[in-house]
Image: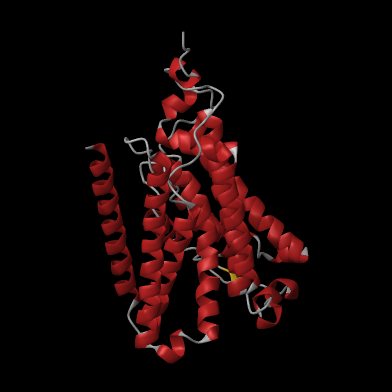
């Protein structure tokens, strides 16, 4: 008698195995992998098409200024700071959470790392303090959400207010100028490697590490599982609370790195640093295909989302459009992206 295939003998989830992160569920016709690859390629190609269109618009409206090498380097550098924050935000949203405090954590880390006492320890002191402050703030978020059972929206909103207040208290409303040459030199053209700013290289490293973690590690698979169905993930043997704690720690780490990069870029620490970074990071992740409901997202898509928003901001600035117009445009893009996501998910359910 022919024995049934091993896969047919199991009706429940295998406790020792988790599905790899994916952007879309397998197709019902059995062609899961081809369908997955096709949908992924279409979304990434669409984002690349939008980015190319923006470059074309910038080249037409302000050809000399937009296509200047210095301006393109500036776009990449500005995208690098918010891009690092977005990598951490992407992990959090994939897990079904949200972090509204990323901008405030960047501000707090930047001002704490640029106090006179910290600057006495030089480059290492500034970098170490920025990262540690980011991790500490992320730890508080993670503990409140994972073990305090607080709603992520409320916990991170409280952190937003607290971190902004503490940053204001540290600076007394003043700008803290960086006097450490080793830090300032990273932002100078002389430090560029083959024409690439060091901050862009740092961003590239964070993106590669983030991609590997999400797509090639158990941590990434657990993140997707928790976002897809937290209860099912718990039954499969995942410590959901610990996973959420780690994710907010990761978000804090990214904010600390971004704070250091912002210090290099601005040459100072201010309590207003990171203003509306939460909006930009969430928007970039959504544009890149990360579901607000969790369970799906890509690092590559989020990076393209960051580049799209940064390019839009640059084009608006070169054409002397006011900042309020920029914010209105970003808000409209976010609404459109969420509507498209909702329509896509309803289409898959029918």
Residue 187 location, quadrant: bottom right
The one nearer the camera, 260 or 115, is 260
Against 152, residue 57 (above or below) is below
Q: How many marks?
A: 0
Confirm whether residue 137 shows in the render: no
Residue 195 location, quadrant: bottom right
Q: Residue at x 32, y 36 (%)?
A: 29
Q: Position of residue 60 (x, y in %)?
A: 35, 86
Against 229, residue 200 (above or below) is below
Q: Position of residue 199 (x, y in %)?
A: 62, 69
Q: Position of residue 19 (x, y in %)?
A: 49, 34
Against 253, residue 59 (above or below) is below
Q: Residue at x 48, y 24 (%)?
A: 234
The one nearer the camera, 61 or 97, is 61
Q: Position of residue 272 (x, y in %)?
A: 49, 66
Q: Residue at x 47, y 19 (%)?
A: 5
Which residue extends farthest left? 350
The one nearer the camera, 237 or 116, is 237
Question: If the image is split into quadrants, where does the C terminus sit?
Answer: top left
Which residue extends farthest front? 1
Against 167, residue 138 (above or below) is above
Confirm whether residue 92 shows in the render: yes
Name the colouring of the figure: secondary structure
Q: Is residue 134 left or right of residue 47?
A: right
The one nearer the camera, 190 or 127, is 190
Q: Is residue 200 left or right of residue 11?
A: right
Which residue extends farthest right? 121
Which residue extends farthest bottom? 64
Q: Residue at x 45, y 15 (%)?
A: 4
Q: Is residue 285 left or right of residue 72?
A: left
């Amino acid at each position: 008698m022919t024995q049934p295939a091993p896969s047919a003998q199991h009706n429940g989830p295998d406790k020792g195995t988790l599905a790899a992160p994916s952007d879309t569920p397998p197709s019902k016709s059995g062609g899961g992998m081809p369908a997955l690859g096709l949908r992924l390629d279409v979304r990434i190609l669409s984002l690349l098409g939008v980015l190319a269109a923006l470059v074309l618009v910038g080249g037409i409206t302000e050809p000399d200024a937009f296509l200047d090498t210095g301006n393109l380097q500036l776009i990449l550098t500005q995208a690098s700071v918010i891009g690092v924050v977005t990598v951490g935000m992407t992990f959090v949203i994939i897990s079904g959470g949200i972090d509204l405090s990323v901008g405030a954590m960047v501000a707090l880390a930047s001002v704490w790392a640029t106090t006179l006492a910290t600057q006495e320890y030089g480059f290492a002191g500034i970098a170490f303090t920025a990262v540690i402050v980011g991790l500490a703030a992320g730890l508080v978020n993670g503990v409140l959400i994972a073990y305090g059972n607080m709603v992520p929206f409320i916990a991170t909103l409280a952190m937003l207010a607290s971190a902004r207040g503490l940053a204001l208290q540290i600076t007394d409303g003043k700008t803290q100028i960086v006097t450490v040459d080793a830090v300032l030199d990273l932002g100078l053209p002389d430090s560029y490697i083959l024409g690439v700013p060091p901050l862009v290289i740092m961003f590239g490293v964070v993106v590669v590490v983030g991609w590997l973690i999400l797509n090639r590690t158990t941590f990434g698979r657990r993140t997707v599982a928790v976002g897809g169905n937290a209860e099912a993930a718990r039954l499969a043997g995942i410590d959901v609370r610990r996973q959420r704690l780690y994710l907010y720690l990761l978000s804090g780490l990214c904010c600390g790195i971004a704070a250091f990069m912002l210090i290099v870029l601005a040459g100072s620490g201010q309590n207003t640093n990171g203003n509306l970074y939460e909006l930009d990071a969430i928007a970039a992740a959504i544009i890149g295909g990360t579901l607000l409901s969790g369970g799906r997202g890509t690092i590559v898509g989020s990076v393209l989302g960051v580049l799209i928003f940064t390019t839009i901001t640059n084009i608006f600035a070169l054409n002397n459009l006011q900042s309020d117009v920029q914010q209105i445009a970003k808000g409209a893009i976010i609404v459109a992206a969420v509507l498209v996501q909702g329509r896509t998910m309803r289409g898959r359910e029918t």
